[in-house]
Image: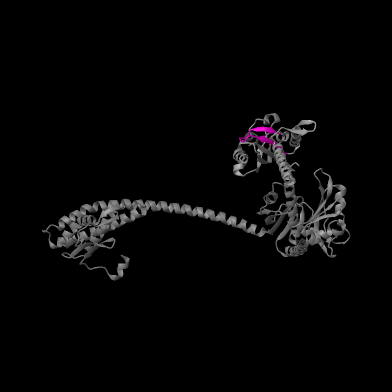
Amino acid sequence: MGIQPDPDRLRALEIEDLRRQLEDAQDALRAIRSGEVDALVVETRDGDRVFALENAYELYRVFVENMQEGAAALTPDGLVLYANQRLADITGVPHARLLGASIYQILGEGHRSLINALLGNVVTGLRESEIVLTRSDGRTVQTYFSVTVMPDGTRCAVVTDLTDRVRMRDILASRDLLHVTLTSIGDAVLSCDVEGNITFLNPVAEALTGWSEQEARGRPITQVFRIVNELTHEPAEDLVARVLREGQAVTLANHTALVRRDGREVPIEDSAAPIRDAAGTLAGVVLVFHDVTQRRTAQRALAESQAKLENVLNSISNGFYALDADWRFVAANRVAEQHFGRPASELLGKNIWETTGAGPDSIQYRSFVEASGTRAAVHFEARSTFRPEYWSELHVYPRDGGVEVYFSDISERKKAEESLKLALIDLEAAKLSAERAKAAAEEASHAKDHFLAVLSHELRTPLSPVLTGVSLLDADDSLSPRARGVVDVIRRNVELEARLIDDLLDLTRVARGKIQMNKQTVEVSTVISGAVEVCRPDIDARRLHFGVDFGHKAGRFLVEGDAARLQQVVWNLLKHAIKFTSKGGCVGVLCRKEGGQVVVEVSDSGIGIEPAMIPRV
């Protein structure tokens, strides 16, 4: 009897064989999917059959060629191995020139660092980014660039044109901005479609109409936007129907009121305009309106104010009238009526130049035109062109569409000014006469000064030898007492005469303006020594005890001044001291420093000066 195989062992072997076949099949599928094989060999009952994978490749090629994105196979360093037509369309580079080209040249050298990062995304981890590329025709295109690294190292790149997406994004952003704007502006905005049904209300329109947008949407506009005449309360014209009919923007008539949902009327101003789509087709109507309640209140207040102003203008003493841009009277008070000799009812609407006869060369015409043109006030005085005896002072102010004129009668003032002019002429004649007299007096004064100068010089010249002779006689010991007394009388009189002549010479110099100061650094001791030397003959003649003291400390006494004038001062002091000191008396000069000054004192043992006379010295 033969040995029977173990069923469990056979089953295990069979399972192991199936597992091995399954692993082979899975490995074959992986190879097919990864592109590692180009064909399949399949065993059949009829023998082996070979199946090429070209059909599968064609399917993927057709898919890539017809996709809306640009696709390319790249080497690791960026050379294009394959590119579809869409990539050529996006970049603007002919398809034939793409193959073998560098992706850096296609997308732009400016993106090199970014492209390097994308191509090396196995290391960098960067797989996609937006790139703004410049086409060959110069147009810029915003794109989305993504790269996938294949197992063999090939880079599969996909370039997506974002132009339409960006445009749509901008459109949506514009719509959002428009919506925000319409809901934020201070005017009420309401829109409807071509059927006249509400499509939009902003918050201001909701507040004015009393309808919320949710409640109003889809309702007929005449139900939400009811308008009447503000004065008669009769229904106003349907603006939406008019715009839909004419296709043009229209504006509400004056005195229009909106009837709110609660029945209350609100005065408004409104305009309506057609809404057109991109093709220019009428798509609806938009209304923009706002509450003018405050304006109406202000207008009523203005009317009352104008009435009060008219009363005020009629009560003032000055004249007033207003002109429009065509120089026609639009207002005049009672003083103006009297001035023009016509009531205001006849003046209104009349041209002022036709009324007054003033031409373009008149000061009135030129001043009015100046105020109107420069928009600045003009003030002037003028004689009336139709009342020659009448003078007026005019103030012209620009106003919207014309000028306002305020004037006053200055005829009496002008008469006074004419009288004043005549008086001024007489005064000018008197002034001229006085100036002539003054000139004659000055000429006489100059002649006098010249005479005094000549006289002083001529008188001083002969005194010098007389004084010398008197000094010689005085020194003569042989003179009798009587003769010496005569000599003393002569000396005193000659000295007095010399002093008077010196004073006259100085007075003459002052009058002629010829005294000049020559300021320089002066040694005071030198000045004193010069004055003493001049006075030495008199000191000796009178046998005076004389001395000069410059202080116990040696040093120089320097000052700023005119040496000659300083010496003259010291000389005068010494002369007076010598003159009024008896023979054998004492005269001395003391010089000292006191603070920042130099003090010179001349002392004598004479009779002195009376206290009452000191302030006059």
Judge whether 103 appears above or below 360 on screen.
above
User: Going 69% across and 29% down the picture, which residue do you hit?
Assistant: 96
Q: Which quadrant holds the N terminus?
A: top right
Residue 76 x %, y %? 62, 36
Q: Which quadrant holds the C terminus?
A: bottom left
Q: Is residue 602 visible?
A: yes
Is residue 80 shown in magenta? yes
Judge whether 418 appears above or below 612 on screen.
above
Residue 123 x %, y %? 59, 42
**Quadrant of res 410:** bottom right
Residue 106 in the figure: left or right of residue 584: right
Residue sticking out furthest to the bottom: 611
Q: Nearer the viewer, residue 505 or 246?
A: 246
Is residue 112 shown in magenta? no
Residue 553 in the figure: left or right of residue 290: left
Q: Nearer the viewer, residue 320 or 32?
A: 32
Residue 293 in the figure: left or right of residue 79: right
Q: Main secondary structure of the magenta part?
A: strand
Residue 157 x %, y %? 67, 38
Residue sticking out furthest to the front: 1
Tally the marks: 0
Residue 56 x %, y %? 75, 35
Numbered range of the magenta stretch: 69-83
User: Going 64% across and 31% down the picture, which residue do you hit?
Assistant: 101
Q: Is residue 356 visible?
A: no
Residue sticking out furthest to the top: 96
Residue sticking out furthest to the left: 478
Q: Nearer the viewer, residue 199 or 407?
A: 199
Identify the colour scheme used.
one colour
User: Going 62% across and 39% down the picture, which residue do you hit?
Assistant: 119
